[in-house]
Amino acid sequence: MGRWEPNARGRLEQAAIELYVERGYEQTTVAEIAKRAGLTERTFFRHFADKREVLFWGSGTLRDHLVNAVGAAPDSAAPIEVIAGAVESVGVLFDERRESARQRQAVIAANAELRERELIKLASLSAALADALRRRGVPDPAASLAAEAGIAVFKIAFERWISGTGEPDLARLVRESFDELKAMAAGS
Amino acid sequence: MGRWEPNARGRLEQAAIELYVERGYEQTTVAEIAKRAGLTERTFFRHFADKREVLFWGSGTLRDHLVNAVGAAPDSAAPIEVIAGAVESVGVLFDERRESARQRQAVIAANAELRERELIKLASLSAALADALRRRGVPDPAASLAAEAGIAVFKIAFERWISGTGEPDLARLVRESFDELKAMAAGS
């Protein structure tokens, strides 16, 4: 694992997304991705198990970030606040990356298998958040409910973020969506 | 479509679920399901496209029920109350069917492909609820947020219902979970 690795990975990722947008995900081969990135197929497979993983390798990072943020919240915080803070804090993982997030999402929206994979990813993030709350002593169903609400807010804020062009950053949209959920739950 | 059809469908469904529980979903063939039900394969395929559809044919009924309930809510009802009422009202579709719902859920939990299909079903119910709210003039992101919250509550209440043995009916567990979401969103 030399110092060049992040560059190779980044180049492969960029080349893959470009090709998925241009030609469609199904029509793109690993050989073409490697060629576009100026690298070999062997290098591709050192970084990714297959062409799908290029779109989902970040899930583990996202999950770890969320789980760590839940664990680090003050003991006094209410479950929904713990979740809101954790989801808001993932905004920094995406800052300056709106264009590539938008492209990734367009590729996923165009393919049924990828849409399923994305749903599985969100369900597993929700399960990880619920587990992290239970470790804080939050009982069920409160833990599951707060986690599901958090992922629903994340999904909706993310869609607003990638479809927008103005300044609001992801963290701010997450906070706004949580506030909207609260206002709505209060019956307004 | 003669009067015997509901019986044939019901017998096939029961035979299929029994076999999925006994032998596993992957190991069960349509021929075995038909035989167990005392019917022909041809009759099976008059009712279901494949062995997976036995587990998911109710999705359309569920979606229609939810969408109709949203459309029928009083104009004055707040979005979250419209959704809570709609989700609560599906309880009647499941009453007296807890044992078969439990078996179906166990079959799904044991198979990755079926778990994915279930996630897709829930995502499409959420999309249908959000559409129904938009038709009532509820703007986004409120419509999506209320719909996602409703499906999250349904999922959690359903899990509580099938894992329980006591008296609470599904509608009551849905109402309790909505109240819990409200209390949680209020920060308690």
Image (cartoon, coloured by chain):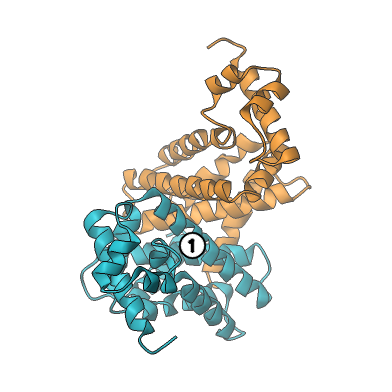
Chain colours: A cyan, B orange
Q: Position of residue B107 (x, y in %)?
A: 66, 44
Residue B49 shows up from this direction:
yes
Image quadrant in which you'd find residue B6 = top right
* Tag 1 subunit: A
Quadrant in the picture for the C terminus of chain A: bottom left
Kindly identify which residue carries mark 1. Answer: A121
Specify whether B63 is left or right of A74. left
Specify whether B116 is left or right of A118. right
Placement of A81 over or under B101, stated as above or below: below
In the image, what residue occupies the spot 40% across and 48% down?
A: B127
Nearer-the-camera pick, A175 or B4: B4
Quadrant in the picture for the N terminus of chain A: bottom left
Q: Position of residue B167 (x, y in %)?
A: 76, 45
In the image, what residue occupies the spot 28% across and 59% down?
A: A20
Q: Position of residue B123 (x, y in %)?
A: 46, 50
Exactly how many numbered labels are in the figure?
1
Q: Hey, what amino acid is under mark 1?
A: Lys
Specify whether A18 is left or right of A62. left
Nearer-the-camera pick, A168 or B105: B105
In the image, what residue occupies the spot 53% across and 19% down?
A: B46
Q: Position of residue B66 (x, y in %)?
A: 48, 40
Q: Judging from the image, what secondary structure is the residue with disc 1 in?
A: helix
